[in-house]
Image (spheres, rainbow, N blue to C red):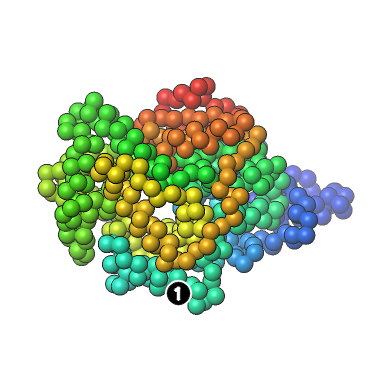
Amino acid sequence: MVSDPIRPGITAILLPLALILALTLTVILGAFASEEPTAGRPVAPVLDVECPGEPVPTELVVTCHQIDVDGASLAVSVLHAPDPTGAPVLFLHGGPGGRAVADRHRWLAPRSEVLAARDVVLVDQRGGGDSTPSLDCPEMTSPASRESTSGGLAGDRACRDRLVAAGLDPAVVTVARIAADLVSVRQALGIDRWHLHGVSFGTRIGLELLRTDESAIISAALDSVVPPDADETTDLPDGIVTALGVLDAQCSNEGSCPAGVLEPLRRVLAHLATDPVVVQVDDRSLTVDDTAFLAAAVRTLGRPDGPVLVPDAIALADTGRLAEAVDRLAPLSDATASIARSAGDALSEGAWAAVTCGDQLPRMTFEPTDIDDPIHRAEHGRWSQLRARCAAWKIPASEPATRTPVRSAVPTLILAGGLDPLTPVRWAEAAARHLEDVGVVVSARWTHAPSTWNPCASHLVARFFDSGERPSGGSTDC
């Protein structure tokens, strides 16, 4: 990888001494506009490092760095546009506990439209990805932890105990701390102002940056938004039913699921609630109850191919072929995932627990909204399991101010999918009510995080950064 993207257009010897010094500083900080640090906070040094993972074939210059912040060292990658004419874009990955640097190929092959005129900054948030210290949990794949598929907490407890014994407090990973880290990254890279592109949990961080660092943000694209004041235990059961209803209508109209989706799913869940089934997936025997099956179906529907897989899986389960149904959903289910856990992997369980239990749990009421509906009842079971996991992690509640609505005048684009059961459309509408200059775009064909996989959605984001344009009335042909 090339580490120096600077292309000076004037011979240095002809420049005044002051300008030479200015250019030297610019090279060190990555060719961004410089800014005075916040009073009392020194600018962190930018250490050049080898990019993690396999090299990505690209004609663009890609640089990777480590930037020290308070108590952590963040992995950062800058994807340099061939001829940047606009301010850079900070990408805020999902999670909590996700990563971005090792997944830079998603921007480079094929090349994102955003990179035509803007550099893109990728940051692995505190505790996850290739940032250190890592809060990943290898314990989650140990034999003892496999009881967690039926509600056990051995892996959670073992991971927390190891981290605490090593002097690592998971509770330091909070929405407020992650946002502050990103302000430090901006200053270290010498960026005066940038655009934000947040996806899923990344929108929560984006909203917090709008609250705390608004003057440094030119515009914000928030895809599959998570409002800071959302009560997930109240909102998500209805959101799941709504998304499944949209899927039911679409596939029934197209003739791909003659029996529908909602009613067959309710029959499956009602049966599993009273009579869980043991199925064999690869080398593992798993007990599948109504909560586990719904969780797998919801996660699957959130994927680009979910609208095809979910009706098929539900139809199989409704005819008694549960093992085949679970096999369709297994790679996307927490209960049946067999991904190896290691530093830099796709999910840092400790970071996930810290933010989920410290930032999100305090807003949850845990009151069932419609216990007579098998879908609501199964989803309520998942939240009961979450409360038990958080008790095992012993994460204290974070600062309450980060759970209040964010008000901002920054131009904002919000994307939402009618088929998204993870971040329902109502959340997009709720966040938009507090923003002064916002456009909300909803497509009935989108599932979760469409700007990461749907060409039309990603084009809307790139066009918004270039011109501020948003579809009038929220209409789109996507």
Q: Residue furthest bottom?
A: 165
Residue 366's place in the image compared with 155, above or below, is above
Q: Residue furthest top?
A: 472
Residue at position x 24%, y 51% in the image: 290
Q: Is residue 294 left or right of residue 76?
A: left
Residue under circle 1? 161
Instruction: Pick the residue in front: 80 or 127.
Output: 127
> Callout 1: few (<14), some (14-19), or many (20+) C-alpha neighbours within 10 Å?
some
Instruction: Pick the residue in front: 92 or 232.
Output: 232
Quadrant of the rendering where the N terminus is positioned: bottom right
Instruction: Pick the residue in front: 428 or 118.
Output: 428
Q: Amino acid at mark 1?
A: Asp
- Name the spot of residue 138 as percent of width and height, x first: 39, 69
Q: Is residue 359 left or right of residue 145?
A: right
- Name the spot of residue 14 as percent of width and height, x first: 85, 48
Residue 108 seen from this side: no
Q: How many marks?
A: 1
- Secondary element under disc 1, as helix, strand or loop, is helix
- Name the spot of residue 242 as percent of width and height, x first: 34, 34
Residue 275's place in the image compared with 137, above or below, is above
